[in-house]
Image (cartoon, grey):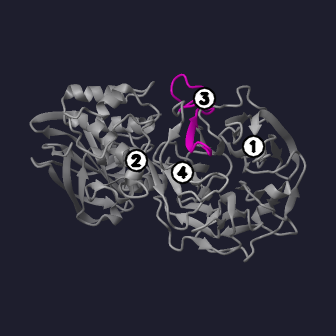
Amino acid sequence: MSFSRRFPRSAVAAALLPLLLPATAGAAGISGTVASGKVPLAGSAVRLFAAGSGPAAPLGSARSASDGSWSIDYRAPDGAQLYVLATGGSRRGVRHGQQLRLLAVAGAASAIGEQPTLALDERSTVAGAYALARFADGAGNVGGPSPGLQNAIATAANLFEARAGRVSFVLGNAPNGLLTEALPTFNTLANLLATCGSGTARDCRALFAAARAPGARRPANTLAAALAFARSPWRVTSAQVRLAIPRRARRAPFGPALSAAPKAWTIVIQYTGSGLNAPGRMAFAADGTIWAGNNFQSPGTTAGLELTALTPTGQPIPGSPFSGGGLRGMGWGTAVGLDGRIWNSNFSGGSISVNAADGRTLSPDGGYTAGDPQRPQGVAVAPNGDVWIANFGGDSVIRYPKGIPDRATAQVITGGGIVKPFAIQVDDRGYAWVTNGAESARPGSVTVIAPDGRTLRNVSGGGLRSPQGLALDSAGNAWIANLLSASVTRISRAGRVSSDSPLRSSVQGGWGIAVDGADHVWVAGFFGGNVTELCGIRRSCPPGVAAGRPISPARGGYDSAAFEHITAVQVDQSGNVWLANNWTTASPLSQPVGGAGLAQIVGAATPVKTPLVGLPLRP
């Protein structure tokens, strides 16, 4: 169902405002400019809205002057997230109607001050469309559940600082800037939109035809076109490239821009610092905080002693990185429970560490050793609070009933094919799914364990060869990333391998794997440093793409200069895809050097409720 069908239009929203957001702050004002291709738009209809969990609420409107300036007085509802739409206007005497629609994200009303200024243009529109790809529609309605909406709005400022009228510091500087393709891609997308505002109605129609995704309606305005690119980044056509990369005689307004066709229209942001060094896996808390255990300790490759915590926009939270409590060489085990506690398996330390939701250490100095963890890897928290650990070095699985790491109650599970267990996930029934034989040339398997610790079945075949990551979809099917067979294996809830397994496509050494809120499957390629998006069981996919088939480009998947040897992929509540750069590509695999932090594909997926406990659900 489209956003516009789920939420009423602005007139109805205004009537509902007292019910949805009863309290209001004091009077304030907001002003700014509206332009297309750096040329002011006169007579543009500018409207201010408050976004929330329900319909967007209109707060005021104005018409832009001949220099593109405008000003609106308003009263903001408490907790409101503000954004501005500009529709139509005249550019150098050429009048545009509804087909020209620009968006700029202002942010939380409580944080922008009483008299902020805001710049609306194609760059602010691209930033808003990508960050809010899962919360906005082409008509300009923005809204959705918390905290995904708030975090998405904050993410827009990592692309374009609308209140400053410039590309953000995050996007414009190292480790991004000209070190990756993100900034040129962002500017090229803005140039694409500008072909409408700086041209004629015919140019607008050409843009909308190029932006239209298979099976979707043709965009009716520039905002809808930007959303189409954000939601279908896999689609790169010759018509798009001709518009995006004009001849030299037609100088593009925004630069630096791409000089050749991109592999995809993804915008990938890289985040480093706060102790990030060879992050193995990350997990999200309920508020969107990102927790990542680090394999190595800066500046070398000794066992990592720190746990990094970042805000949903990639900034360190106070106190990060955290140390102590036995943290030592975290491998692939980082999980957050419903109670907010963070669990980490210490591959080098042979123990389990626990931190409180605010980062405080809860485990003893040497970590917890109940169940005799030996080089432990994956950790999962069950819906009932049990904690399950893939005890890689002990050929066993450890269960802490109710999350209590006590020697008297810890259960050690062996047999049933459990050998070199690596990843572990627990479904809605409390059944644990475990991959066996990681980092081995021998055929691997998946063991299914009952909530009480009984091994129920051992599944083999279907390309299971060094199975690393495992993810469950909303129907309880398991998807496994295989490192050595460069493929994905699909296993039904009943434990049967799909007839089309192994699924190969563009997977280049599968390691991390995740399922988003639309059941699309995201696979991190360790060897190729790429990401593959597969159609899932819901078939909410482009026409003609069956379950298990690639949505991302068939050759190479999604690629970026920000990707290194990736071991983990996860999806947050805003629909961003996050990746862990575990090892750098600048060194041989025989002599690994820690990778450069985390990478984020902005707005590419359907949001997932976090923390991820049980099956993936939409927020």
Residue 182 badge? 2
Whole-angstrom CA distance, mark 3 to mark 2, is 27 Å
Q: Name the residue that disc number 1 marks.
A: 466
Whole-angstrom CA distance, mark 3 to mark 4, is 21 Å
Q: Residue at x 41, y 54 (%)?
A: 176
Q: Amino acid at mark 2?
A: Ala
Q: Residue at x 50, y 48 (%)?
A: 576
Residue 529: in magenta span: yes
Mark nearer the N terminus (2 vs 1): 2
Whole-angstrom CA distance, mark 1 to mark 3, is 21 Å
Q: Amino acid at mark 3?
A: Arg
From this view, report whether residue 340 is shown above or below residue 171: below
Q: Amino acid at mark 4?
A: Trp
Residue 549 badge? 3
CB atoms at circles 3 and 4 under 8 Å apart? no
Q: Main secondary structure of the magenta part?
A: loop
Whole-angstrom CA distance, mark 2 to mark 4, is 15 Å
Does residue 568 appear to the left or right of 424 in the view shown? Answer: left
From this view, report whether residue 590 is shown above or below residue 304: above
Q: Name the residue that disc number 4 marks.
A: 578
> Which residue is nearer to you in this view: 405 or 141?
405
Q: Which residues are magenta?
A: 525-551
Residue 588, percent across and down? 62, 52
Mark nearer the N terminus (3 vs 2): 2
Give residue 236's quadrant in the image.
Answer: top left
Label 4 secondary element: strand
Number of other residues with Cα within 10 Å of mark 3, as a class: few under 14, some 14 to 19, many 20 or more = many
Number of other residues with Cα within 10 Å of mark 1, as a class: few under 14, some 14 to 19, many 20 or more = many
From this view, report whether residue 429 is shown above or below residue 323: above
